[in-house]
Image (cartoon, rainbow, N blue to C red):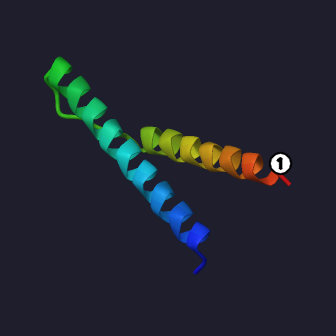
Amino acid sequence: MENWKTKTIVIGGLIGAAAGVIAALLLIQRAEETQQAPRLTAGDGVKVGLGVLGLLRLITDIAGSKK
């Protein structure tokens, strides 16, 4: 694998991991404020999934427009 590809994968992985940790911390904070265990419904899962797909599409559109 070329050097720039490795760097891109590592940086993307680190950013994704950091975003996941921040999301979990926010979820925990909200649960502590309401003093209820966090519950994610199927509808919430669909919303998150569609949001992630939208974000991925945005990233690929930005990368494709640089040509």
- Across the whole image, how many numbered discs are drawn on residues? 1
Left or right: 58 as drawn, with respect to 18 = right
Residue 51 versus residue 63 in the image, above or below: above
| Farthest residue, direction right | 67
Residue designated by label 1: 65
Residue at horizontal 74 percent and vertical 52 percent from the top: 63
x and y percentages locating residue 16 in the rendered image: 44, 51
Q: Residues within 10 Å of mark 1 (few under 14, many from 20)?
A: few
Quadrant showing the N terminus:
bottom right
Q: Is residue 40 left or right of residue 1?
A: left
Amino acid type at circle 1 is Ser
Task: Locate residue 4, reporting x and y percent.
Answer: 60, 67
User: Which residue is depicted at the point 81% across and 50% down?
Assistant: 66
- Looking at the image, the residue that sits furthest to the front is 3
Give how far across and how far down residue 15 sits, in percent. 44, 49
SS class of the residue under badge 1?
loop
Relative to the observer, which residue lies in front, 49 or 64?
64
**Residue occupying the far top of the picture:** 33
Q: Which residue is drawn at 80% across and 53% down?
A: 64
Residue nearest the viewer, comparing 60 with 32: 60
Instruction: Compare residues 67 and 19 and report the one nearer the observer.
Output: 67
Q: Compared with residue 34, is residue 50 higher up or lower down, i.e. above or below?
A: below
Image position, residue 39 (x, y; %): 27, 37
Q: Quadrant of residue 30?
A: top left
Q: Quadrant of the C terminus?
A: bottom right
User: Residue at the spot x=30%, y=44% of the render?
Assistant: 21
